[in-house]
Image: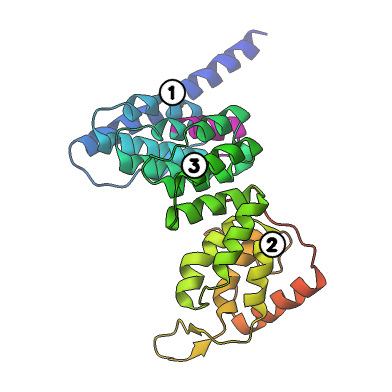
């Protein structure tokens, strides 16, 4: 029995020492930033999983710092610790910190927090966290279009009424369109129709693929995806080759694959850890994807990613 308790004490001492070392490394890094260093965050901090809770707790002090640079670094570390962590409770702790950043005095930091939250699966959010984000929506806020799409990303139909209320306060333009995208994400039929009506007059070219198709994919709306399927099957070469030495028009479907395929459950095209398609022959990949769509017309969409 004595040996057992000795072993437990030894393990506890090791863990305590490890936590202290990690916290000290964080303190040293933040101090270097305060002194003007532009050094990246030590990888040893970002890869730390065992002491993630201790690190997240330690970051709270720096997230309340009067220096916006320190706050930005602290929130960034918290985001990166949380997004890749295997334990949901840790991810939710990191989400809490990013929700707090949504109210930061620095508007740029608020935008970073919006972007950070979209990097978590929406199944990671608690109901309370979803509601806090939804409650933060108002028509006068900076970067309303980004925030509205974050609200639409929440897997909670309580988002619909506030989004509709804000939409009615915006007369027209890009912001209103983004709110309609958010509503389409939540399955609102009126907003879905509005989005598709705008697409009827859109010119399908490189600008459309790079600027608009990621927004349409965001909706995870089958009616919108049917519109995107038309581009996949189109034989009109309205896009430019990515090869600067080969000035030739190509099918826009090649470009659209990169955005559309990862959002479909069971897609025959896979992506790497950075979200890039693992494709060497795009002509074959497009044909394979077309064949798969024909064979699987009732496919499901990946709902838990942004």
Q: Position of residue 304 (x, y in %)?
A: 64, 47
Instruction: Point out the frontmost of discs 1 and 3.
Output: 3
Q: Is residue 136 left or right of residue 158?
A: left
Disc 1 secondary structure class: helix
Q: Residue furthest left?
A: 35
Dot label at residue 17: 1
Gap in angstroms between the C-alphas marked 1 and 2: 56 Å
Residue 75 in magenta stretch: no
Badge 2 is on which residue?
223
Q: Position of residue 181 (x, y in %)?
A: 56, 54
Within-10-Å neighbours for mark 2: few <14, some 14–19, many 20+: some
Q: Position of residue 140 (x, y in %)?
A: 38, 39
Instruction: Point out the frontmost of discs 3 and 2.
Output: 3
Residue numbers of the magenta segment: 83-97
* Residue in the image at 66% along x and 64% along y: 225
Residue 84 in magenta stretch: yes
Along the polypeptide, which appears first: circle 1 or circle 3? 1
Residue 47 appears in the picture as rendered: no
Disc 3 secondary structure class: helix
Disc 2 secondary structure class: helix
Along the polypeptide, which appears first: circle 1 or circle 2? 1
Dot label at residue 166: 3
Figure check: 130 above or below 275: above
């Amino acid at each position: 029995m004595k040996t057992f308790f000795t072993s437990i004490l030894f393990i506890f001492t090791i863990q305590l020492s490890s936590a202290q070392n990690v916290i000290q490394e964080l303190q040293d890094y933040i101090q270097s930033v305060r002194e003007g260093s532009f050094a990246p965050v030590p990888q040893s901090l970002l890869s730390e999983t065992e002491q993630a809770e201790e690190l997240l707790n330690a970051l709270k002090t720096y997230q309340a710092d009067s220096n916006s640079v320190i706050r930005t670094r602290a929130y960034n570390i918290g985001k990166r610790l949380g997004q890749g962590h295997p334990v949901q409770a840790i991810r939710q702790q990191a989400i809490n910190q990013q929700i707090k950043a949504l109210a930061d005095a620095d508007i740029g930091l608020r935008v970073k927090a919006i972007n950070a939250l979209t990097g978590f699966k929406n199944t990671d959010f608690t109901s309370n966290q979803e509601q806090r984000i939804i409650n933060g929506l108002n028509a006068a806020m900076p970067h309303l279009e980004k925030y509205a799409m974050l609200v639409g990303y929440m897997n909670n139909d309580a988002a619909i009424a506030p989004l509709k209320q804000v939409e009615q306060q915006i007369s027209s333009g890009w912001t209103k369109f983004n709110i309609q995208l958010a509503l389409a994400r939540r399955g609102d039929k009126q907003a879905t129709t509005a989005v598709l009506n705008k697409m009827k007059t859109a010119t399908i070219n490189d600008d459309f693929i790079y600027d608009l198709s990621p927004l349409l994919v965001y909706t995870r709306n089958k009616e919108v995806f049917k519109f995107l399927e038309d581009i996949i099957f189109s034989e009109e070469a309205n896009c430019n080759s990515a090869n600067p030495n080969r000035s030739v028009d190509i099918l826009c479907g090649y470009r659209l694959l990169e955005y559309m395929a990862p959002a479909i459950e069971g897609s025959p095209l896979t992506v790497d850890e950075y979200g890039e398609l693992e494709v060497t022959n795009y002509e074959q990949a497009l044909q394979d994807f077309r064949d798969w769509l024909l064979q699987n017309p009732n496919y499901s969409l990946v709902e838990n990613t942004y």
